[in-house]
Structures are given as C-alpha cells and as structure tokens.
C-alpha cells in the first residue's frame, strides 16, 4: 500500500501534522538532515519543495527560499540523490511539491521512476491543469503507484471538488484561502464557513488544510475541520533563522503552536 494511504487508513482519531520546506535551503546539503529531524520529532509526513524560479502560488517567504536554493545549486536531479541517500532511514511519507515545468523537463516517466527509487510517495503540482493530470500525468503516476495530490480553494466549485475527489487518491489539499502562502494569525468567519461547507460534502478522500497556519488558533481550527494541518511558511522562516538546524527550528515551531 502507498505510504500516504497507509498513514490515513491507520491514523485513527489522531490529527496529522505535515510540514513543508524547500529542499536545498538554507543550505544545499541540509535536505536529508531536515527530513530525518522532522520524522524524529513526530511529524507525520513531509512536503519537500522543488525550487523553481517562478513559484506563482507562493508568498514571499517560500519564494525567497526557492531563490536561495537555486543559488545554492539545488536541482531536481540533486534532490533525488539527496532523498535516495536517506531512503532507508526514513519511514514516513515524503511528498514532492513543485511546479510543472521542471517535472516536464525531467520527463514524466523518468520523474515518477525516480520518485519510487528515492522513496517518494506523492507529488503536489500547484499549476497542473486537471485535464493534463487526467490525460498525461495520472496514467504514469498510477503506473508507479505515486499519488498526485490536488488542491482546492474557497473558490473551487462543488462540481469541481467532487470531480477531483472522484479522480484522485491519497488526500485533498484544502487551501485555506485563494491568496498565496503565508502565515496568518487567525481564520475569519468566511474561512470557517468554507471549512464547514467542505465538511458537509462528505468527500471520499481525507483533507489536509494548509496556507496560513502559524499558531495555536489556526492549527486547532484546521485540525477541527480536516484530518490535519500543513505548515509551510512559518517553518521555512524558522529554519532559515536557525541556519538549517531543524531541531532548533522545530523547537521554536512547537512553542509557537502552543501559544
């Protein structure tokens, strides 16, 4: 069974916590150590960013991380090498998050084959058109048993959400707002209504809520309305401040989530 499906099938009442970071940032060679520290500290699954020069869905924090990683010399090929080196030391699901252009340039079959070889269980491609997913990506991903996770936002129609739910597997990434990534202090009533609306749809796939989670209030709100929460910008900021020391960044993150 794919590790993502296994995680959600066996989680029971536990609310999951996933973290995102950009590979190759703040240091080129810190990727493996960051992943191992996250697993050691109880993170349930990890989104590993593929740096790209034009990350349209990302706010300034993750854009800056991608720029730093590219300047450090990070490439998709090097990322696969970094993941392969720690494959036997990591048991939690790893999900690559990146834009379509680098994956297309790598070649779809070669990309998904490398995912298997390096221990990756899923991918998130924010700018992937759903038709291209169905026609070009899904057949190759299914061949390699890699889950392609799709995003929904408050603007996504019910018809579209149900179509995504029918044609994907693993979980649905529920973006808290239509804006770019970035920490928020609270989720307003409009976002709460969005959460309730999606809950009422009784979708087949579990959902994870991401974008804007940075403190106790936003974390608890996300966990109350989904299978768990995904934190990106907040951890990326803390990891940069800690100069790549993941344990120090995690200490500060857990402290912030308790406030």
Image (tube, grey):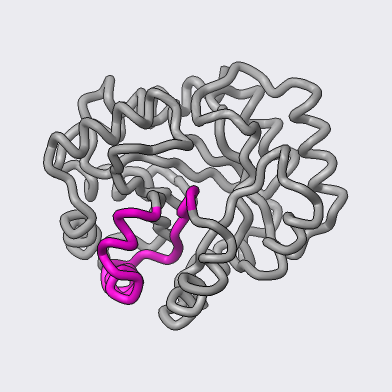
Q: Report x, y in % for residue 77.
A: 18, 59
Residue 6 in sight here: no
Residue placed furthest toward the right: 200
On the picture, is 208 further left or further right than 29?
right
Classify 254 as above or below 172: above
On the picture, is 91 further left or further right than 134?
left
On the picture, is 18 further left or further right than 221?
left
Classify 109 as above or below 161: below
Q: Report x, y in % for residue 202.
A: 83, 57
Residue at 45%, 41% (x, y): give it: 19
Q: Report x, y in % for residue 188.
A: 74, 20
Residue 154, picture quadrant:
top right
Residue at 45%, 74% (x, y): give it: 141
**Region of the chain picked out in magenta, as a range:** 100-127
Residue 69: in magenta span: no
Image quadrant in which the C terminus is located: top right
Which sits in the foreground, 243 or 168? 168
Which sits in the foreground, 163 or 184? 163
The dominant secondary structure in magenta is: helix
Residue at 29%, 35% (x, y): give it: 66
Residue placed furthest toward the bottom: 143
Q: Report x, y in % for residue 245.
A: 24, 31
Residue at 52%, 65% (x, y): give it: 132
Residue 63, picture quadrant:
top left
Residue 182 in sight here: yes
Residue 124: in magenta span: yes
Which sits in the foreground, 228 or 166? 166
């Amino acid at each position: 069974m794919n590790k993502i499906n296994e995680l959600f099938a066996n989680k029971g009442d536990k609310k999951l916590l996933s973290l995102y970071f950009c590979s190759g940032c703040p240091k080129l060679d810190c990727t493996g150590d960051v992943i191992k520290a996250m697993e050691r500290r109880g993170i349930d699954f990890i989104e590993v960013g593929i740096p790209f020069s034009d990350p349209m869905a990302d706010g300034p924090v993750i854009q800056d991380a991608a720029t730093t990683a590219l300047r450090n010399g990070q490439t998709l090929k090097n990322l696969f090498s970094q993941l392969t080196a720690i494959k036997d030391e990591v048991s939690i699901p790893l999900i690559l998050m990146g834009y379509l252009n680098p994956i297309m340039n790598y070649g779809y079959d070669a990309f998904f084959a490398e995912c298997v070889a390096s221990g990756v269980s899923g991918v998130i491609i924010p700018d992937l058109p759903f038709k291209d997913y169905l026609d070009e990506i899904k057949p190759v991903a299914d061949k390699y048993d890699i889950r392609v996770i799709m995003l929904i936002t408050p603007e996504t129609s019910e018809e579209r959400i149900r179509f995504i739910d029918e044609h994907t597997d693993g979980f649905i990434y529920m973006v808290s707002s239509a804006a770019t990534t970035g920490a928020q202090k609270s989720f307003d009533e409009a976002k709460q209504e969005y959460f309730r609306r999606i809950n009422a749809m009784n979708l087949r796939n579990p959902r994870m809520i991401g974008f804007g989670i940075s403190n106790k209030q936003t974390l608890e709100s996300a966990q109350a309305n989904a299978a768990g929460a995904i934190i990106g910008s907040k951890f990326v900021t803390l990891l940069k401040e800690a100069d790549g020391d993941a344990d120090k960044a995690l200490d500060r993150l857990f402290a912030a989530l308790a406030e």
